[in-house]
Image (cartoon, rainbow, N blue to C red):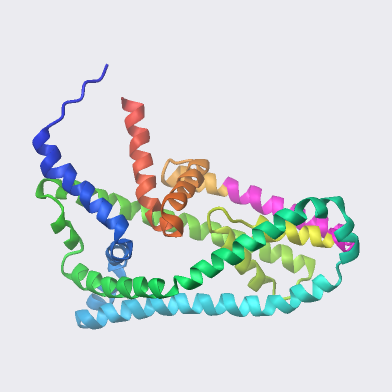
Amino acid sequence: MIAFQINKKEVLTQWIPITIIILLSFIAYPLALAILCGYFLYPITNFFYKKFKLPITLSVLLTEAVILSGVLLLLFFLVQTLIDIIPLIHAHLVKLPVAEIQRHPIFLMFEGKFQTLLNKFMNDLLVYLTHLPSYFFELLLFSMGLFFSLHESLKDRLWFLVYFPKQTRPLCQKAFNKVSGVLNKFISVELKLFFLTLFLLSAGFFVLGMEQPIKYAFLISLVDSVPFLGTGLVMIPLSIYFFLVDQHTVGIIVFLLYIFVQLTRHIVESVLWSSSMQIKAVHVFFLSATAILIFGFIGILFSPFIYLFANKWSDFTKTS
């Protein structure tokens, strides 16, 4: 039997303030994210500051400009790809035997559910549109917070630990150093998996004779890198489409390509995670899914902290 000794002074002076800080971080999450991003983007700002001898303010602005340019380029590429895909989808939908599909028992079974999902999607979209002003305000707060966070990080990367109790700062500093290592490994693994999926899909689409195979493979690989989504979101409907237009051979090839990509990706993912973090890929999936269910899609940014906690908890259960 394990006996726990509670030090009231330690609880009052250390853990209660930390709990309050964590709760405030969840409430004011744009500012908390700005502080975290400032910490993790410090190497870029420091590179401009030390390498090119730029002033601190200019280094910070240049860092934000680089990040903003990267996001805008990605959005431009996605929008351009979607604009190219829409006429292609319309041209293929025209070929579908709509009358036969509507009489099919499977279509009749899912027609009501599809209509319900469509209505829910439209209602959610309307709610998001009504909240656009608040989203812009949160984005403004995040941008301003990121500027000040990067500015202070050049002076002291862990400047925000001043809000933590003095006794816990060494522990928090050690935790953030560990999280930085976990984040580097996380990004490294995800980039390797992204390029692997991109290569396999590009080769498969090229063999099938598709136009612009790299562009469409890039879009599907990007979808595949988001938890809960995957290549199946595109590949399975594509395979079904070819079966509906009586191109069974192409449909089978697309489905086999999907299975091959998924198996290869999962094998490589397990090897990469086992070698870098000693965490199995299945645990990575469930931990990422948990972070997203709790925090929304911004939970992806908190995933490294959860991986670190899971790793430490695993060590604790082995030794306890």
Q: Is residue 300 left or right of residue 158?
A: right
Q: Quadrant of residue 295?
A: bottom left
Q: Does 256 sit above or below residue 96?
A: above
State whether residue 52 appears in this view: no
Residue 38 occupies quadrant = bottom left
Furthest toward the top, the residue is 1
Q: Position of residue 184 (x, y in %)?
A: 38, 57
85 to 180, vertically: above or below: below
Instruction: Between residue 122 and residue 253, name the one nearer to us.
Output: 122
Magenta region, residue range? 243-267
Q: Magenta stretch: dominant SS?
A: helix
Q: Image point 47% across, 50% down: which residue? A: 293
Given residues 291 and 44, the one toward you in this image is 291
Image coordinates of residue 13 in percent, x first then y, are 10, 43
Q: Quadrant of the C terminus?
A: top left
Query: For the point 43% across and 54% down, which residue is it?
Result: 186
Relative side of 224 to 41, left or right: right
Which quadrant of the rendered structure holds the N terminus? top left
Whether residue 269 is visible: yes
Q: Position of residue 60 (x, y in %)?
A: 27, 77
Residue located at (89% from left, 57% from top): 103
